[in-house]
Image: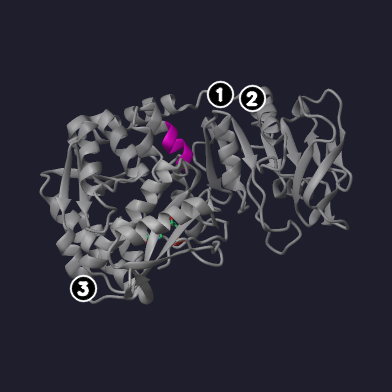
Amino acid sequence: NVLILDFGSQYTQLIARRVRELNIYCEIHPFNNPPKNLETFKAVILSGSPYSVRSENPPHPDLSLIRGHKPMLAVCYGAQYLAHFSGGLVGQSNTREYGRANLSYVKEEEPFFANIQMGSQVWMSHSDTIKELPTNGVRLASTHDVENAAYKIEGEQTYAIQFHPEVYHSTDGKQLLENFLVHIAGVAQTWTANSFVESTVADIQEKVGTDKVVLGLSGGVDSTVAAVLLHKAIGSNLHCIFVNNGLLRKNEFTEVLKQYEGMGLNVKGVDASSHFMTALAGLSDPEAKRKAIGNAFIEVFDKEANQIEDAKWLAQGTIYPDVIESVSVNGGPSATIKSHHNVGGLPDFMKLKIVEPLRMIFKDEVRRVGASMGIDKELLGRHPFPGPGLAIRILGDITPEKVSILQEVDAIFINGLKNSGLYNKVWQAGAILLPVNSVGVMGDERTYEKVVALRAVESTDGMTADWVNLPYEFLQKTSNDIINKVKGVNRVVYDISSKPPATIEWE
Ligand code: XMP
């Protein structure tokens, strides 16, 4: 178990991912609110930070229970922090210390740098630099511009580096983390999907006992994996509710419901299409539509959940990035604030206790956990789909006709991607129905019909994205199929905007 103390670096999550990739469990905690059970952590990593140790009020953690007691690795700000407050000197750097650099000196026979060659590429990102090492500091590595790129403290298991081992561009970064965590700190590499399932199932059983748990299934990866885990733990005491808001993809409700039943889940499908359609009637403002859908969902879900007698718990598919984001927003050091636009949030009046079995793992780990429990590959590989569904892909007001036009278009596009082997190369794809008509000609007739836009993006987390260079032949065939087969559409365009400055969804 490894503790990462976060000083607000944009890379902190990446450190956690790299550590997990070594099959080592780790947790991120804000530097100003470290966990109470420090004794359970075998090693500590200090993250980088947007702050300078020379600024007026730099993050100043209390390391008295850590330093000298446990193996500690200080990265970037962490390294400067150690130097600045322990007898060294940190000053403004005279040369560029951003981006690529190469190790030009590595101390011989130093286990911290085992299997890392001179010349290895490292990634720097700082404007301060360590001019003098702290008391008992021993230089371990340098680059051309950064003399004290790495050091250790004699007599302690304390290591510090000014570059970022967690970023992809630090070629041997993972090896360095392995050297520190496995070979120096002696942390066991036992964190696997199977071990996660085993321990989580035991945790759930202990936590909820014989209580009933309610869970809203969305058809997405997170809620599905959460459901299967809970089902493994408590069987039919898990009551799943799958709401059809009428804004899902074509046939999705029936197909996914069948799949859930096939997996043995205790699931109730609730067709509330008309409820949502009524709630949306006449609304065209994107935020108003989101709100109406959110409220409608709560009404429907609340009514269903109330029918499950003595339900005590609400289970949610919250994953680690959501948790970290909300920790940051609630007083942590990081400056990023993501606007959460999930419709799944439920009001306090439901009075249920919350269980979130995935709250400590990342998306790719959720998939691995799902695969290890035998969940269908296709289900696990599904593109993300927004909670408000097609309502935010139909610009302007929603009518059942528009929904069914868009469902047809979307199905042709998505099936086309699947049939061409492109689906898994794309992070998310969908079609958008635009609120304009354009003139066309079919046969000898003039048409005046709708325009649809196709969107396909690559991304890792949806925070930034780029459009995908789909082959022209594919776009050509898809456009033809759509215009020939979907009545009411006479023009197809392809969205070539990145995020930022555009967003993935149009609304
Ligand atoms: P944007 O449009 O903000 O989308 O670039 C980023 C990712 O979030 C999804 N998205 C939503 N998901 N409720 C959701 O559950 C929403 O209201 C919502 N809006 C956008 C979007 O599909 C993409 O994956």
Q: Which residues are magenta?
A: 363-368
Estimate how packed mark 1 is, as few (under 14), some (14 to 19) or many (20 or more) residues with alpha carbons within 10 Å.
Answer: some
Residue indicated by mark 1: 189
- Of residues 180 and 258, which is closer to you in this image? 258
Q: Can you tell which mark lies on residue 182?
A: 2
Q: CA distance from mark 2 to mark 1?
A: 8 Å
Going from N to C along the chain, the mark reached first, 1 or 3, is: 1
Task: Provide the secondary structure element on which disc 2 rests.
Answer: helix
Relative placement, left or right, of 289 versus 131 is left
Residue on which the image places disc 3: 281
Magenta-highlighted stretch: main secondary structure? helix
Q: Residue at x 35, y 27 (%)?
A: 373
Q: Secondary structure at mark 1?
A: loop
Q: Nearer the viewer, mark 2 or mark 3?
A: 3
Of mark 2 and mark 1, the one earlier in the sequence is 2
User: Per the image, is 480 magenta?
Assistant: no
| Residue 166 percent location from the top left of the image | 65, 41
Magenta-colored stretch includes residue 366: yes
User: How far from the left and from the top, in percent, is residue 386?
Assistant: 36, 56
Q: Report which quarter residue 255 is drawn in.
A: top left
* Label 3: few (<14), some (14–19) or many (≥20) C-alpha neighbours in 10 Å: few
Question: To which quarter of the image does residue 434 belong?
Answer: bottom left
Colour mapping used in the image:
one colour
